[in-house]
Amino acid sequence: MSSPNVAVIVVAAGSGTRLGGAEPKAFVTVAGRTILERALDEVFAVVPPPQVVVVVPADRVDQTSRNLDGTTATVVAGGETRQQSVACGIRALDPAVATVLVHDAARALTPSSLFQRVVNEVVLLEHGVVPGLPVVNTLKRVDERDLVQEELDRAGMREIQTPQGFPRDAFVASHESATNDYTDDAAVFAAAGHPVSIIEGDHRAFKITTPWDLRRAEQLLAHPVVVSGAVVGTRTGIGMDVHALDDTRPLWFCGVYWPDEPGLAGHSDGDAACHAICDALLSAAGLGDVGSRFGTDDPRFADAPGADFIAETVALVTGAGFRILNVAVQVVANRPKVGPRRTELESVLTALVGAPVSVGATTSDGLGLTGRGEGVAVVANCLLASGVSAQS
């Protein structure tokens, strides 16, 4: 059998002091198996199989080799720093390898599909490729006293992940010529004058660094359910919103403009359907609610369209590692009449959420605010998934 032309160096030599465990980080268990084992599941699932080099603390080489007996992985001792550990992995590369990926074992839930996308882009572009996600939080620079000095523009910012991929010869030369100790291999590669491109990352590729991260990983691995061939953990959420009618305002409802209908009162555009969807998504993800995220005391949301609320909420939910599977919306109101525009509403909301949205409607038989025609009420529920490979 011919030697593989792709190699994955899995760096697992860190001490993991911030995790607070008695074991080095890669040997801490998550949902019954070590972080390193979880990470290697995805590496071994890459097709075609790459050469796998695992870098561990020197006193863990024998143990790891025994655990990986029967696999094709090579286990080597790491150095004092991450960069030195990667250099140890480089020395174990097969001569036939043309593309090298470096992966942190601490990103244990990274799906094998991300490895394959990185490999494909490295071969296509012939330079460095790293996965990254847009920054969703506001960034501020502070001084040594933690006083804010300036706000940074997050538009051009990315949170960088692994695996990071490179053409083998240029990558090896970059490490050999490095004079500084960098925090990732893309920086080593760029410092040598080589270009690095960023592709879309994966929310499952988060790094287990703190006890909170470990709990998050355990939660994602708990109670697995198969969806479209993948093993996922699921969560449901419920949201509700009520707004009174306001004849002085235009009606925006379910993200759509309704001419010749009274609008809805509220600090924003009053789109109760969009707000209920946001509450359902936030509650399922454990991220609070519309009131805590988009408060009425915040001038940014004055007259803000419901579509903006959904866009921000989807970013928060997916940023927390969840995938939205579906949303169901139930409207309780005398008006507007949902039936004639149901298909349009579902199409618009589905595009906003990025997952199927169904819309139903009923009345309250003359009872209460909605029955008297004074306002609308909307209830929404959703299903979220946190996907990991079926091999996990």
Image: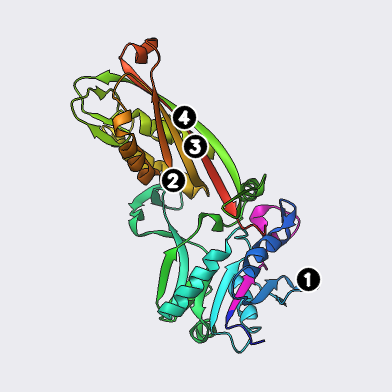
Which residue lies at the image location 30% right of the left edge and 14% below the top edge? 373
Question: Residue tagged by mark 2?
Answer: 355
The alpha-carbon separation of the residues under discs 2 and 4 comes to: 17 Å
Is 143 above or below relative to 185? above
Q: Earlier in the sequence, mark 3 or mark 2?
A: 2
Q: Earlier in the sequence, mark 4 or mark 1?
A: 1
| Amino acid at pointer 4 | Gly
| Amino acid at pointer 1 | Asp
Q: Earlier in the sequence, mark 2 or mark 1?
A: 1
Q: Which residues are magenta?
A: 7-25
Is 346 above or below relative to 193? above
The image position of residue 14, as x and y in percent, is 66, 65
Question: Residue tagged by mark 1?
Answer: 59
Question: Residue tagged by mark 3?
Answer: 382
The alpha-carbon separation of the residues under discs 4 and 3 comes to: 9 Å
Q: Indicate left or right for 47 with 329 as reference.
A: right
